[in-house]
Amino acid sequence: MGEELLKAFKQTKHQLPGNGFREAGILKEAFKDVDGHLESDMYGDGQIIEDFQNKMGEYLGKDTAVFFPSGTMAQQIALRIWCDRKGTKKVAYHPLCHLEIHEQDGLKELHHIEPVLLADKHRVICLEDVTSMDEDIACLLLELPQREIGGQLPDYQTLENISVYCREKGIKLHLDGARLFEVLPYYEKTAAEVCSLFDSVYVSFYKGIGGIAGAILAGEKDFTEESKIWKRRHGGDLISLYPYIISSDYYFDKRVNKMGQYYEESKELAEYFNNCENVSTLPQTPVSNMFHVHFSVAKERLVPILADIYKETGIGITGNLRETGENSCYFELSIGDNYGNIPKEQIEKVFGLLDERIKALS
Amino acid sequence: MGEELLKAFKQTKHQLPGNGFREAGILKEAFKDVDGHLESDMYGDGQIIEDFQNKMGEYLGKDTAVFFPSGTMAQQIALRIWCDRKGTKKVAYHPLCHLEIHEQDGLKELHHIEPVLLADKHRVICLEDVTSMDEDIACLLLELPQREIGGQLPDYQTLENISVYCREKGIKLHLDGARLFEVLPYYEKTAAEVCSLFDSVYVSFYKGIGGIAGAILAGEKDFTEESKIWKRRHGGDLISLYPYIISSDYYFDKRVNKMGQYYEESKELAEYFNNCENVSTLPQTPVSNMFHVHFSVAKERLVPILADIYKETGIGITGNLRETGENSCYFELSIGDNYGNIPKEQIEKVFGLLDERIKALS
């Protein structure tokens, strides 16, 4: 049944989420105007990689930055370095942290680091979670926004308080900024302002930015130099990373200044969902380009409704639904370029149909 | 001075080694005829990655194959799996193994595996090295050809004997086949025949094949499935690996059947070097597309000679020289498409000048 929905979604002309499908055209567009004689990076050196690292270091307000093939690699390495510096094997993060649930326990299996899980999994980490933490902890990782709970954020004052506390206690603060660009409009801060609260920062280029893959890890020079040694050890110091670097740079320039637009559109779209019977978003008012959409409807009853709406309107809402109970399911949605290209009356038609057909179920 | 030589080399019209410079054009050529709507792989799934894995599994005569961003990652993981299976932390390999000298000790630092170094570093591993090994060893890694000593090979009978011995003793045999395609013409064997001697096999797509980056790890299904879990842990299970997969596939098709030509040309070119005063190749008669060129000449005296020859003939021999002593230096050379495109009389002119000018030094 999941396949039926995905198939119907892929056949739509427009989609509410995203920047378009993940296709080879993304690479082709990024390379269209690249000179064929442009020299490859070589094992982390060369102008292509150094220029982009410098550009991102500056944007994030950090001395230095290193390009990594993945955030999984970059973040494990960041935590390992902070652990080695303090001589402990303990870090702290949210129970739904990417490292805890999506990385096959690489942090534990490769680095033997023991995470302490902070906060209830249904809410973001608050100051009290941090101040009641064991001081033996080398590093606290904060994910902004907390993706697995719909992209929620602590308020900025909380971030500042956590940062001050950690500095006092000698606990390093690491930013999982997979979606950092996406939260800047809500915080009304620059990336450098947010990053100044953290000792190390990871950002990704294939979420809101819409690139192919790749990550940046930024911090002070002694930290990033050490991260390069671990990058080699992990097998991430490829002879050529330019396919990811050039595309990351291209889509960063194309979209980083559109995050404000995505944020406004995300609030608008969440309202459409919240106006439907048995539908609600988490958070109710988004604080970035993303949110979760929850249905008090059984997945098997919702799939045919959605698939029909896709066929009738040519507009896709989501390609997958995850069951949360017998009569409930949800999906994650992130706004990109697609949403703004759909005429408003067509979007209203979609939500009219959705509301009507869910109502007809009861 | 190294920079002077590299600069002169890059300005030549023709180069004796390689397939051309490592430039963005390599990616552009591979993607020229790729449909923009071709769907990306997704975290190791999808047709692009599965088709190529199946193709390589078949070519290598193994049940299954997994695409990795790097050989560094693939090989550490292979050794880790074999160690876990046997419940030991010991593997054996050559003192100049890639894992020992080029990976910042990832095998030791991430996997806590202790390598036993076999053989003298100036020669390849022989049967006696293996039979005198501790049986507690989980896996023996053989690199074909042994790159750091000019690309030398054991004879095929030795390989077969080592394989039989290891199977008897319950020691897994892993092939570092970074340059496997390149040695098949010398052995007069198919890849599948050579690989049948090994339990696990790694091959690379940016040596003789001339792709951008990427590796395949092949073996039985339970082994490769486990390797996927470790790939995720290492941070190598990227959302999209297609830039490397498509280019690996493209250049594999373009060059895998040219290895016989490269091998013949390599023997011819080695003879040109060996006919020059104070110049010799290792091995004297190449057994693949590669060899080392040793000079009994001080590096600082050789650099201006080479740079002048590049300018006069428009043909580059090498971009770098490594000192081995006060009056000796060497470089590594691998034949690709370039050599066959240079008119023979121009090559003869290069070697006439080289011989003459080295003679003039004494």
Image: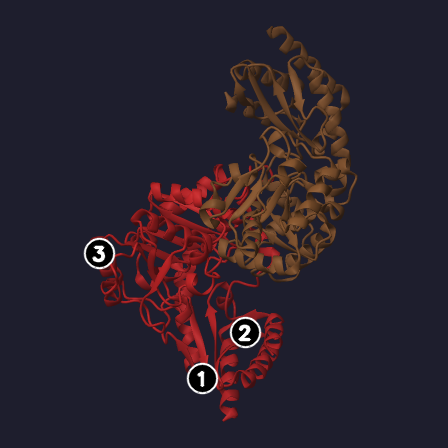
Chain colours: A red, B brown
Cα distance, mark 2 to mark 3? 41 Å
In this figure, which residue is indicated by the disc labeled 1?
A: A276
Q: Are marks 2 and 3 on the same chain?
A: yes
> Is residue A187 found left or right of A273 in the rendered image?
left
Cα distance, mark 3 to mark 1? 43 Å
Q: Residue furthest left?
A: A168
Question: To which chain does the residue with label 1 belong?
Answer: A
In this figure, which residue is indicated by the disc labeled 3?
A: A164
Please tell me whether mark 2 sits on a helix, a strand or a loop: loop
Question: To which chain does the residue with label 3 belong?
Answer: A
Please rate how many residues cluster around mark 3, counting C-alpha atoms within 10 Å: few if below 14, some from 14 to 19, many from 20: some
Between disc 1 and disc 2, whose residue precedes? 1
Please tell me whether mark 1 sits on a helix, a strand or a loop: loop
Please rate how many residues cluster around mark 1, counting C-alpha atoms within 10 Å: few if below 14, some from 14 to 19, many from 20: some
In this figure, which residue is indicated by the disc labeled 2?
A: A320
> Is residue A237 found left or right of A198 in the rendered image?
right
Please tell me whether mark 3 sits on a helix, a strand or a loop: helix
